[in-house]
Image (cartoon, rainbow, N blue to C red):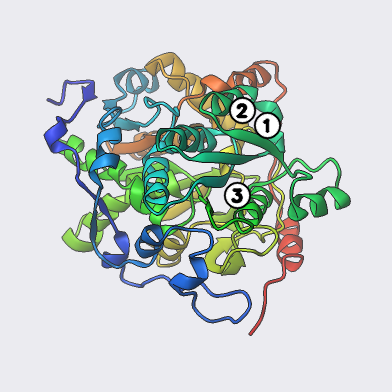
């Protein structure tokens, strides 16, 4: 089995439950707080924007939660996703280490985002919702939600971060094909968007701004709900289908990872690949390391502050305990649009605070170099977001060789880059600048991102 390049599961081996890491965390995350009262939010505080079943999952401490049959049926159209051993990449590097990657780009959306889009649309449909709103950075999440909403008969309005709206027109057209309406954010459709444009008519937008716009629209209609593609507990829960499959596949390969790596924006794909393996550390004494790789231009885990902050720019969300750069932080216009988020998810933030996960930041040119090496050796053109995980895996292999040891490395290849070809064009033209957020910029952002004090 070790000599197999692709490792698949049978349908009977597919997990029938999502894994909830809260059940096994040594320190439970702090509760989200109501921005008006400072008290922990209850289900009634979230009911205006989320269906009750997702609210229950958000606060659940149950270790495993059943996957509904209708969701599982759609999962079966593209899952289990394959686990590959990167033999050609290993050979080119001349490394002694074994490199594996879980490929999540083979579904209708081209990324891991489908894993939570499907259940989110399903639960909203079950509770009588007619329309949904959401945000998207590079467009993977918007694409995933567009198909899922259309499948379950829901309308969808997507606020797409303006810089990505113009960088990636193919994603907009894909969402239109799946029957979604797409608006560049900030927009004149909402008070939140108009406020930003009054201050900065040329604003490139951010996920925080787009979230504010989507929530504002959802609050205006009782039959409209909001969905989020990362950050929240129930999103990480749904993504654990990735890591659970990978556990079984690594066993089939007669291997177990020394290090698990994922790129990091809000935390959904990193959580998905890592949480089931982190459980093995917590419960069964494994010693695997977990590395989240984020952009140097948006380094919330490596340079941010652990504190309560809003998940959006306008302060409509509950206050979340997270590593943050400040909810008013506007990241540089890097091509990994899905990683341009000011904060880290609550669960990853607590695990990072407890020293159970590591984080590092990378410049985009180095990541594109790794992505091109990967494409030339493994035949898959990675999404710009996924290139950060590749760069992290290359770091681990090279370091192991310098130390004279062999490691087993697993990373999540969260999506393909077919809609990002212009970013590769800019790289080949030498027109892909690096940017690093400075301590001064972050301090200023945090100072200008006030949150209520109680």
Identify the residue shown where x is 75% and y is 40%: 204
Identify the residue shown where x is 51% and y is 34%: 140
What residue sits right under mark 1 in the picture? 165
Q: How crowded is mark 2: few (under 14 residues within 10 Å), some or many (20 or more)?
A: many
Judging from the image, what secondary structure is the residue with disc 1 in?
helix
What residue sits right under mark 2 in the picture? 172
Task: Indicate the position of residue 372 as horizontal and vertical percent values.
Answer: 51, 20
Can the viewer see residue 398? no
What residue sits right under mark 3 in the picture? 341
Q: Residues within 10 Å of mark 1 (few under 14, many from 20)?
A: many
Q: Which of marks 2 and 3 is nearer the N terminus?
A: 2
Task: Indicate the position of residue 102 as horizontal and vertical percent values.
Answer: 32, 33
- Relative vertical location of residue 407 with respect to residue 43 in this rendering, above or below: above
Q: How many labels does the image show?
A: 3
Q: Which of marks 1 and 2 is nearer the N terminus?
A: 1
The Cα atoms of the two marked residues, 3 and 1, are separated by 16 Å
Location of the C terminus by quadrant is: bottom right
Q: Earlier in the sequence, mark 3 or mark 1?
A: 1
The reply to whether discs 3 and 1 touch (Cβ–Cβ < 8 Å) is no
Task: Indicate the position of residue 226 as horizontal and vertical percent values.
Answer: 53, 52
The Cα atoms of the two marked residues, 2 and 3, are separated by 20 Å
Which of pointers 3 and 1 indicates the residue nearer the eye? 1
């Amino acid at each position: 089995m070790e000599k197999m390049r692709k490792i698949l599961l049978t349908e009977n081996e597919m997990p029938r439950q999502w894994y909830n890491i809260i059940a096994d965390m040594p320190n439970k995350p702090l509760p989200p707080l109501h921005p008006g009262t400072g008290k922990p939010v209850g289900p009634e505080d979230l009911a205006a924007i989320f269906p009750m079943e997702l609210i229950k999952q958000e606060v659940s401490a149950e270790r495993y939660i059943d996957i509904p049959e209708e969701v599982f049926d759609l999962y079966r159209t593209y899952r289990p996703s394959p686990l590959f051993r990167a033999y050609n990449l290993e050979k080119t590097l001349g490394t002694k280490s074994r490199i594996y990657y879980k490929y999540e780009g083979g579904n209708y959306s081209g990324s891991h985002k489908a894993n939570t889009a499907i259940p989110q649309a399903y639960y909203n449909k079950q509770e009588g919702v007619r329309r949904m709103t959401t945000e998207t950075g590079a467009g993977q999440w918007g694409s995933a939600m567009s198909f899922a909403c259309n499948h379950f008969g829901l309308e969808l309005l997507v606020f797409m971060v303006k810089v990505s709206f113009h960088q990636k027109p193919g994603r907009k057209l894909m969402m239109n094909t799946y029957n979604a309406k797409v608006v560049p954010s900030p927009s004149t459709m909402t008070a939140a968007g108009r406020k930003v444009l009054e201050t900065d008519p040329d604003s490139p937008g951010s996920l925080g701004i787009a979230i504010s716009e989507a929530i504002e629209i959802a609050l205006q209609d009782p039959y409209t709900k909001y969905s989020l593609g990362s950050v929240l507990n129930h999103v990480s829960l749904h993504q654990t289908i990735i890591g659970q499959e990978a556990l079984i596949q690594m066993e089939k390969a007669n291997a177990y990872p020394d290090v698990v790596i994922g790129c990091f924006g809000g935390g959904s794909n990193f959580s998905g690949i890592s949480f089931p393996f982190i459980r093995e550390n917590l419960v069964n004494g494994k010693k695997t390391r977990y590395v989240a790789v984020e952009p140097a231009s948006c380094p919330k885990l490596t340079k941010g502050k652990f504190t309560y902050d809003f998940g959006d720019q306008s302060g409509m969300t509950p206050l979340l305990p997270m590593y943050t750069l400040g909810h008013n932080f506007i990241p540089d216009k890097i091509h990994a649009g899905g990683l341009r988020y000011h904060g880290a998810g609550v669960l990853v933030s607590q695990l990072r605070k407890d020293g159970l996960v590591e984080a590092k930041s990378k410049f985009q040119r180095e990541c594109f170099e790794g992505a091109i090496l990967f494409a030339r050796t493994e035949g898959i053109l990675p999404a710009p977001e996924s290139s950060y995980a590749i760069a992290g895996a290359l770091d681990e292999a090279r370091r192991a060789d310098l130390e004279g040891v062999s490691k087993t490395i697993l990373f999540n290849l969260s999506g393909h880059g077919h809609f990002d070809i212009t970013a590769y064009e800019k790289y080949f033209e030498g027109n892909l600048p690096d940017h690093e957020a400075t301590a001064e910029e972050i301090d200023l952002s945090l100072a200008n991102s006030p949150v209520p004090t109680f």
